[in-house]
Amino acid sequence: MSADQKPKVLLFGVGSVGAVYLYLLSKVASTTAVCRSNYDIVKANGFTIHSSIFGDNLHIQPNVVRSCDAAASQDTRPFDYILVCCKVIPGVPNLIKPAVTPGRTVIVLIQNGIGIEAEYATAFPNNPIVTGAVYCKTTQRPAGVVRHDEVELLELGSYPSSASNGHAEAFVKLIQSTGATAELHDDVQTKRWYKLLVNASWNPICALTMCTDVGFLQSSSLATTFVLDIMLEVCAIADAYGYTFQREEAEYQLARAVARIERGNAVEPSMLQDVREGRRIEVEAIVGNAVRMGRERGVRCDKLECLYVLAKARDAQLGRDKADNLV
């Protein structure tokens, strides 16, 4: 297949997860990567990926740009897909707008959190939106060197769930053609809420304590119950919006972390990675939105609210630290 016949894909915000999917999609599509903090290193050296699933010492030298303006100016052919792989921060729709062709480009949100799609639907009312949950255990340290193991899965569907799943199905098939794992769901928000059980608990806990999941569980006899209580608060909020999870499902997610104690393969959640690198964290998408949604439906979530307040303060301090470093 010639380059002109391949789907044209733009990846915006290529961190460790984005790098894995950049490598995979480059097998079947014409890809461009918008890199920000790691631009200089990736431009010079590309990405090296050590994956227990796809192979060790994989290398890709991508077409890399600093902005969507630059990406759009390189080639007048419209992008078929834009994968938004960056952290959930305000203003991303405006940043990707130069590369979005109305009525043509499919916007794929490979991001954490709940309630993140509305701003894209408002900004691009004529473009299909595909969203979902991603499971891909990765780290990028140092910049340009990605380590990936244990799991790779995309659970995808259309936004809103009432929209046709045709574009989501086509993208799932594209991902599957790379050798990756992708599933199509009629209402993928169920999968987003289920992942939030893990994200809204472990991410802020680990970022605030500077512990891995295993390290936190081993820190006190109360740690396990604390994590479970937060997961159950998320279950209660989800239930208020029509997404019901049983207590056993939260217990199963917690048991996965407990099992890692014996195996010795602790998880370093993305927020902990960000704090260690001095980067801002995704407080609103992962914790704040859930707290606000709970309040709107009268759901008590005291421990989740406490995590939110503390994580907001941690994020604010990271912002001040970053500003100080620029002086």
Image (cartoon, helix red, strand yellow):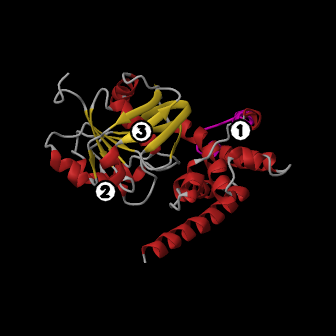
In the image, 198: left or right of 96?
right
Q: Real-space Cα distance between discs 1 and 2?
A: 37 Å
Check whether the beta carbons of the residues at disc 1 and disc 2 lie within 8 A of each other. Answer: no
x, y (%) of residue 317?
57, 70
- Can see residue 218? yes
Marks 3/1: CA–CA distance: 28 Å
Please tell me which residue is depicted at 77% across the width and 34% down the height of the picture.
262
Q: Position of residue 282 (x, y in %)?
A: 52, 56
Q: Position of residue 99 (x, y in %)?
A: 24, 48
Tell me the quadrant of the picture where the C terminus can be found: bottom left
Say which element carries label 1.
Answer: helix
- The residue carrying pointer 3 sits among few (fewer than 14), some (14 to 19) or many (20 or more) residues within 10 Å by Cα, namely many
- Furthest residue toward left: 76
Q: Which residues are magenta?
A: 239-256
**For the residue carrying disc 2, how many other residues have a C-alpha within 10 Å: few (<14), some (14-19), or many (20+)?**
few
User: Residue under circle 2?
Assistant: 95
- Indicate which disc, 3 or 2, sits on the residue closer to the N terminus: 3
User: For mark 1, what is the residue?
Assistant: 257
- Residue behind mark 3: 48
Q: Which quadrant of the structure image shows residue 169?
A: top left
Name the residue at 35% across, 47% down: 42
